[in-house]
Amino acid sequence: MIFKKGKLRNAKLRTKLMITYIILTVIPVAFLGYISYAQYTKSIEKQVGEYIPKLLDQATQNIDNQLNDVKQLPDFLYNSPQIIEILRKDSFQSKSNLLKDKFLIESFLSRSYINGGNSSVLGIFIHSKNRLYSSTKVSYSGLGLDSSSLPYGQNLDLKGQTKILLPYQTDLKFKGNPPFILFMRQLRDYENRENLGTVLIAIDLSVFEHTLRNLEQEKDAKIWITDQRGRIVYHTNPAFIGSLDEKVKDYPQINGSFRTTNLDDNYLISTETFQSTSFRIFHSIALNDLTKETNAVRNGTLIAFIIVVVISIGISIFLAWNVSHPLKKLTNLMNKVEKGDFDVDLPVNSMDEVGTLSKSFNSMIQEIDQLIKKNYQIELRQKDAELYALQSQINPHFMYNTLETIGYAIEDEEKDTVIKMVTILGRMLRYSLNNKDRLVPIASEVKHAKDYLTVQKFRFEDRINFSIDEAIDSDAFYSPKFIIQPVIENSIKYGLEEQVYCTITINIYKADDDQLFIKIKDNGPGIEASVLKTLKESLNNDAMAGRDSGFGLINVHARIAMIFGELYGITIGSEVDKGTEVIIKLPVVRGHEVSKISGGEESA
């Protein structure tokens, strides 16, 4: 209708095309782009405003757990009758006896709290009947028998509660001025119903840094913790610790996120209140920092949009000259493409608008063809990634049983056993959570399997026996992760269900044809012929169909086959009442070949 009146009706075709293009394309796209940018910015702010409080809630729970653990530290004193007996004495003794008592108590404090206790403890002090006992990691000042900055002594009545003191509430200072909080608790003689004194434990606030590390991913974000008066207990900038947050009165008293409006700049601030204390934690990030990447995208998109508009207007001018013939060719080729034939080519006979259209069409078809192939490869890689993600799983029953065994060892005061089991468990967790390398030295696999068997032997004692024979230099050869432990886990699971003793032997050797074999044999009940046949058939099926079953033999076989081909994987032999033998067949992969294999996977 706009071309029926005035001069536009008699205007040239290219003018009409240009005006039509601007009205139907440029203006709507510009409007939609602006709306999209505004909505995207609000979406980012909303998502961050919902996400950060969840992290803060988890962080406060973790810190509360840490603080609760610290509150229980004074209970260790009751485990030593000798220490309690000394604290029952009064201070009217000979100097030699006083020095002897001081040596005994401070040695106990150093051994139990400083050297062998919580790593966050800066120092511990006991005030009892005009006596001061202390043990610290670094030298300190401002706390002594003549100090009036703290109420202490056996007459202090905290009603069984643990009081938290901040640095500004005491004259206590440590060398290097590390930030700390002071836990004060009364020592009670429950047998004689009298007070023995007061114990004070100074905790280094750097213990919070590990818990808050995930919240500091944004380099411009600020995190701080205040008491109920707004005094800053912890801050990502140590210079603010101990100062008063004067703006805290302007913040809402509810948990969640909010935008500042009447402060110096606009910030998105999230807050959460601790459950066990009156502390509050704050996370602040400038709105400009949240949207700075969006602004960069906006500017780049605007420049690209202007360029596209200029080019499109130029193309629209040339299209007005002669479009019928190339459009006919284009229609014919599009019919082929519609049928799935991407092997088409529009001849480029000139460098005018027809040539430009031809080149654009050819480029578009090539890109679509590449995208289709790329999406197909992505689907394969996604499937492979799901299989690979299974490597980071650890059987929760194994974790529970291991921790339960550690608990029993602690109750039996088997210190060496506890240390060894915790060390092994930590090593297994690090190995399980490290997904950086898909191929690892066989020595690492063997070490992980040995750790697993060692933990199980701690649990079942003489019911499990194992031996590992390595006939190769296992540090020189590589294999996928987690191919031995699942087999061993099956042997133990089914072996101990029907037998008292389970014996597992692992043999690792290299054949003459440059192939590696890992043979895992047990003396278990064996597998019935029908079940064994079904299991062998399952090894050739898609392992992802049964991924909910966990980390089993089928998954191990599938991963090996996906990486090295169908010639490699697992073979199973078993006879009822004679045990089961699982052989893992691998190609020889040395250290210099690992990057080549991994690179091939990545390039896919």
Image (cartoon, rainbow, N blue to C red):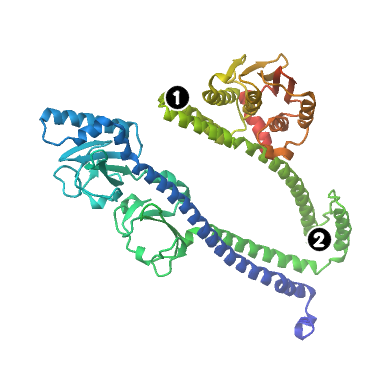
- Kindly report which numbered mark, 2 or 1, lies closer to the viewer in this rendering: 1
Residue in front for this viewpoint, 492 or 568: 492
Q: Position of residue 14 (x, y in %)?
A: 77, 72
Write down the residue under mark 1.
417
Give x and y (percent) for residue 455.
53, 26
Q: Amino acid at mark 2?
A: Val
Q: Mark 1 Cα within 10 Å, few/some/many (few <14, many 20+)?
A: some
Q: Quick check: can you spot residue 121?
A: no
Q: Secondary structure at mark 1?
A: helix
Residue at coordinates 88% horizontally, 62% vertically from top-left? 328
The answer to whether 37 is drawn above or below residue 283 in the figure is: below
Q: Is residue 352 visible?
A: yes
Q: CA distance from mark 2 to mark 1?
A: 81 Å
- In the figure, residue 96 lies in which quadrant? top left
Q: Quadrant of the N terminus?
A: bottom right
Q: Residue at x 84, y 67 (%)?
A: 322
Q: Is residue 436 left or right of residue 574?
A: left
Q: Is residue 135 toward the left or the right of residue 56 in the image?
A: left
Up/down of 35 relative to 575, above or below: below
- Residue nearest the viewer, comparing 409 with 445: 409
Identify whether 93 is placed above or below 68. Answer: above
Return the mark for residue 354. 2
For this orientation, the residue located farthest to the front is 192
